[in-house]
Amino acid sequence: EPEVTQTPSHQVTQMGQEVILRCVPISNHLYFYWYRQILGQKVEFLVSFYNNEISEKSEIFDDQFSVERPDGSNFTLKIRSTKLEDSAMYFCASIERLMGPDEKLFFGSGTQLSVL
Amino acid sequence: KNQVEQSPQSLIILEGKNCTLQCNYTVSPFSNLRWYKQDTGRGPVSLTIMTFSENTKSNGRYTATLDADTKQSSLHITASQLSDSASYICVVSSGGGYNKLIFGAGTRLAVHP
C-alpha cells in the first residue's frame, strides 16, 4: 500500500528555535494535512492545504506556523519560534480527492518534536 | 460541542479472545464514522469507514457497527492476535472536509499470550 513519508522521525530543539518538519505525501494525492497529538491526548487538526494554498486552519495554527509545498513532492510544516507546548507528535496526512465518504485519509508515521 | 467519547480507556485480553470497543459521539452534522488502528509511535491506519446509512462493516477480523439513532458505534475484534495490541481511535467526520474530523481519545488494547 502507498505510504506518506515523514522526516525526521524525532526532532529535539531548543525553545525559540525554528524547526521544519517534512512530509512526502502519496504521489497522486491532492489534499494535504497536518495534525498533532500531544502525549496522552487526542489527535488535533492543524491545517489543510490544496492547490498550493491553505484551505482551512485551526486555532492552534497561529502566526508561528506555516506550511509550504516547495516542489512537486514535499510538504513542510515550519514552526518559527518553538515553545515548550509545541512538543507533540506531528502527523502529515494526504488524500487523493475529497469526493465520496469512503475516501481514505492516509497518515504518515509522524515526527516526534521535543522542545527543551 | 462536538465530542467523541470512547470506552474503555484501556483493555487487556488474552490472545484468541474477542473484544468490543465502544464509541459514543455528539457530532452534528454527521458525515461518517471511522475506526483507526494506531500502533505505538506510528500514524493511524484506517480500518473501516461507515456512512449514516450503514449499520455494519467488516475488515477481516474487525467488524464495526453504527447506530446513528443512538449515536453509538462499536468495533468488535474476533480471535485477537498479539499484533492487535494498539490504540483504536474512533473518528467522526462533521461535513466534507478533513479539518472536520473529531477524534476520540482511543482505547489502548493489549493482547497477552
Image (cartoon, coloured by chain):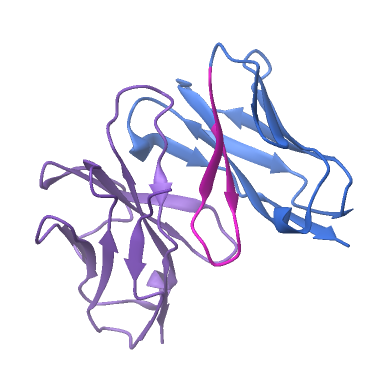
Chain colours: A purple, B blue
In the image, is residue B41 part of the stretch drawn in magenta? Answer: yes
Q: Can residue B52 be seen in this view?
A: yes
| Residue B71 percent across, percent down from the top left | 64, 22
| Residue B52 percent across, percent down from the top left | 53, 15
In the image, is residue A71 part of the stretch drawn in magenta? Answer: no
Q: Can residue B1 be seen in this view?
A: no
Q: Residue at x 43, y 51 (%)?
A: A44
Q: In this view, does A12 lie above or below A36?
A: below
Q: Which residue is drawn at 52% across and 48% down?
A: B45
Q: Residue at x 21, y 66 (%)?
A: A64
| Residue A19 percent across, percent down from the top left | 25, 77
Apparent side of residue A16 relative to residue A53 in the rendered image (left or right): right
Residues rendered magenta in the picture: B34-51
Q: Residue at x 38, y 50 (%)?
A: A2
Q: Quadrant of the C terminus of chain A?
A: bottom left
Apparent side of residue B56 relative to residue A91 in the rendered image (left or right): right
Q: Quarter-wise, where is residue B79 in the image?
A: top right
Q: Quarter-wise, where is residue B63 in the image?
A: top right
Q: Quarter-wise, where is residue A39 in the image?
A: bottom right
Front residue of B8 and A24: A24
Apparent side of residue A72 relative to residue B61 in the rendered image (left or right): left
Main secondary structure along the magenta-highlighted residues: strand
Front residue of B86 and A14: B86
